[in-house]
Image (tube, rainbow, N blue to C red):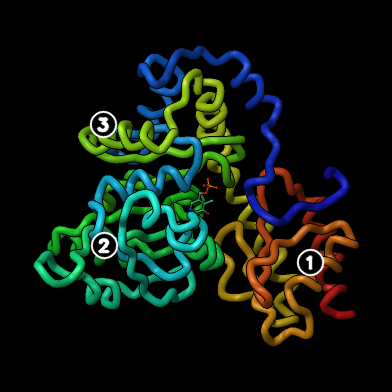
Amino acid sequence: MAEFVDLRSDTVTQPSAGMRAAMASALVGDDVYGEDPTVNALEASVAALFGHEAALFAPTGSMANQIAIQLSVPPGEELLCDGDAHVVTYEIGAAAAIGGVSTRTWTPVGGDIDPDVVIDMIRPAGYHAVPTRAIAVEQTHNRGGGGVIPLSTLETLRAASSAAGVALHCDGARIWHAHVADGVPLRTYGALFDTLSVCLSKGLGAPVGSLVVGSAEKIERARVIRKRMGGGMRQAGVLAAAGAYALEHNIDRLAQDHAKAARLAEALAPFGVVAGAVRTNLVPLDLRKSPLDAHTLAAAARERGVLVSVLGPNVARLVTHFDVDDAAIDRAVDVLPKIFRD
Ligand SMILES: *Cc1c(COP(=O)(O)O)cnc(C)c1O
């Protein structure tokens, strides 16, 4: 694929030579027995990054989210999230199918949230209605175009959910990007949530791996839920080593990915297709007013060596990441406007 500029997703990255070396030399043990020193070290360091007591390594962000949801919401009770949230859009109904969890959604407002709308939706326990047990937010927001929820909004939501006795979960697959874009310390984010899920395999460039972060009591229960879901891994230290390497080397450089996304957005601005302000590494394209639909755009771009994601008939997305260097962005900035011009 070297001949393509791959802007489909930040999941397409190849592990770097340094990362592969770290994986090859990792000390490992059986993690189901709790004996993998590399996994244990990664879990401890990610918990500390967010100021929580514990963390649990999981194979995917979807599993990490679903473990967190099951921690806070018993079967037949309710999770609130927005209608574009990853947990209800891209996890194939797992909350219902696996957790028996009922979900109710608010109308998405890009990557942001109106806390009053969310707070009004909370229902107390009783005999008649489904009780709300948790609220999930996404930072940054994937379908919301990489939007960053302001800290003050999250603080308002935290205060209200605490008052209502409702848990707050953060789908933080790209929380690293929010941290870099807004300069909010990871510990500050950590303090706002009962549980977080974070991904090492998106912008950070590891091949596999996510973590659930929370209290020691929660993570002990999370370990059981992970095993039940088939996520107990054995010598997982080879994977955790990639994650530890990514955390050490690849957070600060996300600013470069944000700058590259801004260049793409600027190049496409004249065509009125960039949906919202581009703050992080995602460039959402709304093609409803464009003569091109998403499939036509993707096919034309592919012919010219640039790969673009199709998220809907009139929705496309560009994503910058580790393996898209400045020369690749130069090429995309040359090619994509030509397609809209033609
Ligand atoms: C990618 C992603 C996840 C997790 O996806 P997996 O493919 O299961 O690792 C979760 N939430 C968001 C917002 C994501 O973008």
Q: Earlier in the sequence, mark 2 or mark 3?
A: 2
Q: Position of residue 192 (x, y in %)?
A: 27, 53
Q: Amino acid at mark 1?
A: Ala
73 sits left or right of 82 in the view: left
- Pick the quarter of the image with the C terminus: bottom right
Answer with mark 2 or mark 1, whichever residue precedes in sequence. Answer: 2
Task: Identify the disc placed on residue 78.
Answer: 2
For marks 1 and 3, the one nearer the N-term is: 3
Q: Residues within 10 Å of mark 2 (few under 14, many from 20)?
A: many
Specify whether 278 is left or right of 270. Answer: left
Foreground mark, 2 or 3, reads: 2
Give me the disc on residue 318: none
Q: Against 240, is 288 above or below?
A: below
Characterize the local packing of mark 3: few (<14), some (14-19) or many (20 or more) Cα atoms within 10 angstroms.
Answer: some
Q: Is residue 118 left or right of residue 82?
A: left
Where residue 249 appears, as percent x and y from the top left, is 57, 33
Mark 2 or mark 1, which is nearer to you? 2
Do the numbered discs 1 and 3 sit on residues whose CB atoms are within 8 Å? no
Q: Are marks 2 and 1 in contact (CB under 8 Å)?
A: no
Residue occupying image coordinates x 59% and y 67%: 278
Marks 2 and 3, how far apart in space? 22 Å
Q: Name the secondary structure under disc 1.
A: helix
Residue at the image position 38 percent from the left and 65 percent from the top? 150
Task: Indicate whether 292 appears above or below 91.
Answer: below
Q: Secondary structure at mark 3?
A: helix
Residue 185 visible to an observer of this rendering: no
State the mark number for residue 220: 3
Q: Position of residue 289 (x, y in %)?
A: 69, 87
* Cα separation between marks 1 and 3: 45 Å
Seen at 44% across and 15% down, the residue is: 30
Q: Residue 298 got which mark?
A: 1
Location of residue 320 (image quadrant):
bottom right
